[in-house]
Amino acid sequence: MSTAPMIWPPPGPLDDVVPRSTHLRPISIRSRRQRRALSSVIVAATALGMLGIAALPAAADPAAARTVVSGQARFEVLSPTLIRTEYAGDTKFTDGSTFNVIGRDDFAPTKFTKTEQGGWLTLDTGAMTVRYKEGSGAFTQDTLQTSLTLPSGQKVAGTPWVTKPTPSCTIGTLCEAEALGLTGLSLATDHGGYTGAGFAAGFENVGNALTLATTVQQAGNYDLAMRYANNQGGDGKVETRTLSIIVDDAAPVTLSLPAGGNWDEWKQTTAPLALTPGKHTIRIERTAADSGRVNVDSLAVVPTGATYPAPSTTASGQDCAFGVVCQA
């Protein structure tokens, strides 16, 4: 597209303007009226050209059109059945090559829908669906789920980031903390009096958690009971500490843990839970509102007011009852 020709030397009155451009054929001006009309056309054409330039949209970035960011998670829709997933705790995503998908910038644009509802981000291409629990951190089998519709119409569900299933804990059964899903915690044995193979030590940082799954047969009120130790922490304080109990996506319930005389003294505490029938995921987590810094030996979900269950006495080499945690 040519710009308006530059005129040099500067013209006199408007009716003396004669456009000069090596890109234009010579024009014969026969009358003042024709010259004025032509000048008006040139001015109008120049204005329209400028408007046209201003109205041209910037070139769209193909990568941006297929990319969805949710907190520290990023998803790139490459094809109807191929979605790249990436989690970056520091939100510094990697734009380099993917070892099993070379030349991903060459994929044709894929139409998809994005919805956010009930705390879940859902990307749907029509053939494939990816769901991510917003703000849940690194991908796990509980926070990133996929489903694929085969040409036959059959739907196949998957959890691509499974490391191992969330351990189950039967209602009314004592479960050793070290056998549950540990996030930022470690098995320790440096204090006496524990049951099982040791205890889950830490809760030093926000996000440290114990995770378990349980199935409720009858709706009602329950207690989450815990056996723990609490004494002088890394902050030099001896005080009542707190953790949060999060059932599925419900609001946290505070679990209060009064201090003991030393780290070898194991105490018990409870917090009430109202549970509906069905399977639930329970996470005991140190949130930003909690003080943490405790050790956990075991826990149990029991009917309200029930006594704390005894540890399993199953010995090595014997049968392990269904639904009971057995020491490895």
Image (cartoon, rainbow, N blue to C red):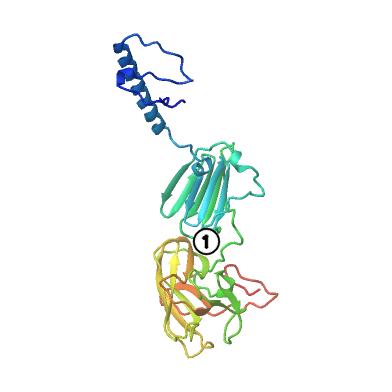
The vertical placement of 122 against 315, above or below, is above
Q: Residue furthest bottom?
A: 261
Say whether residue 221 is visible. no
Q: Which residue is mark 1?
A: 90
Residue sitting at x 57%, y 66%: 167
Residue sitting at x 33%, y 18%: 16
Residue 154 appears at what percent x and percent y?
A: 57, 41
Residue 252 appears at what percent x and percent y?
A: 40, 67
How many discs mark residues in the rendered view?
Answer: 1
The vertical placement of 56 against 251, above or below, is above
Residue 29 appears at what percent x and percent y?
A: 36, 11
- Of residues 124 and 158, the one drawn nearer to the viewer in this rendering: 124
SS state under label 1:
loop
- Apparent side of residue 211 relative to residue 270 in the rendered image (left or right): right
- Of residues 130 and 34, the one drawn nearer to the viewer in this rendering: 34
The vertical placement of 164 against 256, above or below, is above
Query: Residue 14: which quarter of the image?
Result: top left
Query: Residue 103: which quarter of the image?
Result: top right
Q: Amino acid at mark 1?
A: Asp
- Circle 1 crowding by C-alpha within 10 Å: few under 14, some 14–19, many from 20: few
The vertical placement of 263 against 24, above or below, is below
Q: Residue furthest top?
A: 30
Image quadrant occupied by the C terminus:
bottom right
Residue sitting at x 51%, y 85%: 266
- Apparent side of residue 256 relative to residue 89 in the rendered image (left or right): left
Say whether residue 88 is visible. yes
Residue 115 appears at what percent x and percent y?
A: 43, 46
Residue sitting at x 45%, y 21%: 21
